[in-house]
Amino acid sequence: MDLIINSKLVVPSQEISWRFSRSSGVGGQNVNKLDSRVEIIFKIERSKVLSAYQKFRIKEQYKKKLVNGCICIAVEDKRSQYQNRQLARARLASILRDLLKAPPKKRVETKPTFSSQRKRLDSKKKRGELKKKRLTRIDYS
């Protein structure tokens, strides 16, 4: 089953590999018998649907978590393999969606306007006057 990332990008199932193993944690005797832990592996370099720029962006943004140039996600949250597979697919799609978002626009620094500077100073003066009025002066005469 193909993995839908967004309206323009669909990863075919041939580019995703799966690995199954026994899960630790809850499940009783089920844990010792069934391979309910799921690991999904997506090899970035071998992908035919990603452009060179998309591959570069994924590598740059996710470089600390890549394992041999692959995105690996292990899921063992649920007791059944099917549910864990669905969770792994959703997590991979979410990660790829976030990594392929357009970078935010850089903020252009501007000088504050003269009126905004004046307003700031006026509010500071008013605040200072308010605090001066609160002071109690001790008369020693």
Image (tube, rainbow, N blue to C red):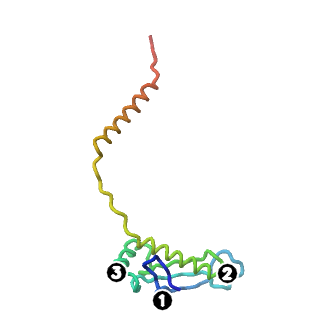
| Mark identifier at residue 14 | 1
Q: Nearer the viewer, mark 2 or mark 3?
A: 3
Q: In the rendered view of the protein, which quadrant contains the C terminus?
A: top left
| Mark in front: 1 vs 2 | 1
x then y, percent, for residue 19: 55, 85
In the rendered structure, which disc, 1 or 2, sits on the residue that comes first in sequence?
A: 1
Q: Amino acid at mark 1?
A: Gln
Residue in the foreground of this view, choosing between 101 and 70 = 101
In this view, 130 is above or below 93: above
Residue 64 lies in quadrant: bottom left
Residue at position x 29%, y 54% in the image: 109
C-alpha span from label 2 to label 3: 42 Å
Q: Amino acid at mark 2?
A: Val
Task: Residue under label 3, please give it.
Answer: 52
Q: Residues within 10 Å of mark 3 (few under 14, many from 20)?
A: few
- Residue 69 pos. (x, y %): 41, 81
Q: Return the disc, 2 or 3, that comes first in the chain's sequence.
A: 2
Q: Which residue is mark 2?
A: 31
CA distance for labels 1 and 2 = 29 Å
**Picture residue at 47% right of the left edge, 77% below the top:** 5
Q: Earlier in the sequence, mark 3 or mark 1?
A: 1
> Is label 3 in a helix, a strand or a loop?
helix
